[in-house]
Amino acid sequence: MMNELDPVSEKVFDPAEAGWRRRLSNPFCELIGPFWQKYEGDQFLLGLLCTPNTLNNANVMHGGCLATFCDQALGGTLFETLSRAQSPDAPPVRSVTVQLNVQFLAAVRPFDFVIGRCRITRQTRTLVFLDGLAEVGNEAVASLQAVFKLVKPAP
């Protein structure tokens, strides 16, 4: 089971060594993280290593953990894309998830590195629509769609 996993005997991917930077997040996400970020060209990517604390009883990443990762990948893409498009003195981009759809396609196994690749597909004055994939290697493990509402920054 979970305590039989030995990362020392596994070849564990090191995000920092591969050019990923740790992404600061909220305390809830730090429970399953750390999250990692980098850009491929202009595309923002979010990553998460599947560690023993993210596993369910079937010894694969818990669906709630993967859904949280997908929400963060979509929200991170929104934040990074809109922040880059505005002037430096504009207030910070803030949003809340209105709708999140995750279709689980394959299991994420211990020590897999999950990468979220997302994009904005449409934007109105207050809503932003996104879609994307969560991948391990070249295999999609989840398909995702979301709607976020833009909110005013807290005073």
Image (spheres, rainbow, N blue to C red):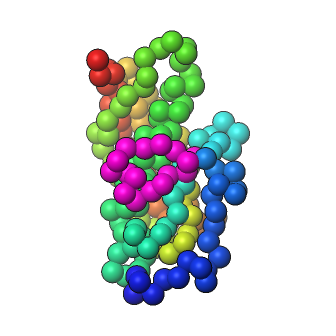
Q: Could you tell me residue 10's position as x and y percent?
A: 61, 80
Residue name at image x 40 percent, y 68 percent? 54
Is 134 placed above or below 120 here?
below
Asked whether residue 145 is drawn in magenta, I would say no
Q: Could you tell me residue 4's position as x and y percent?
A: 45, 87
Q: Could you tell me residue 136's position as x and y percent?
A: 57, 65
Asked whether residue 28 is drawn in magenta, I would say yes
Is 7 placed above or below 137 here?
below
Q: Could you tell me residue 41's position as x and y percent?
A: 71, 39
Residue name at image x 59 percent, y 41 percent? 44
Q: Nearer the viewer, residue 136 or 52?
A: 52
Q: Which of 127 and 153 is in front in this view?
A: 153
Quadrant in which residue 92 is drawn? top left
Residue stretch in magenta: 22-37
Residue with the most extreme front position: 8
The answer to whether 98 appears left or right of 21 in the picture is left
How many circles with numbers are drawn on the protein? 0
Q: Quadrant of the N terminus?
A: bottom left
Does residue 91 appear in this view? yes
Is 16 placed above or below 75 here?
below
Q: Quadrant of the C terminus?
A: top left
Quadrant in which residue 69 is drawn? bottom left
Is 141 placed above or below 21 here?
below
Residue name at image x 57 percent, y 64 percent? 113
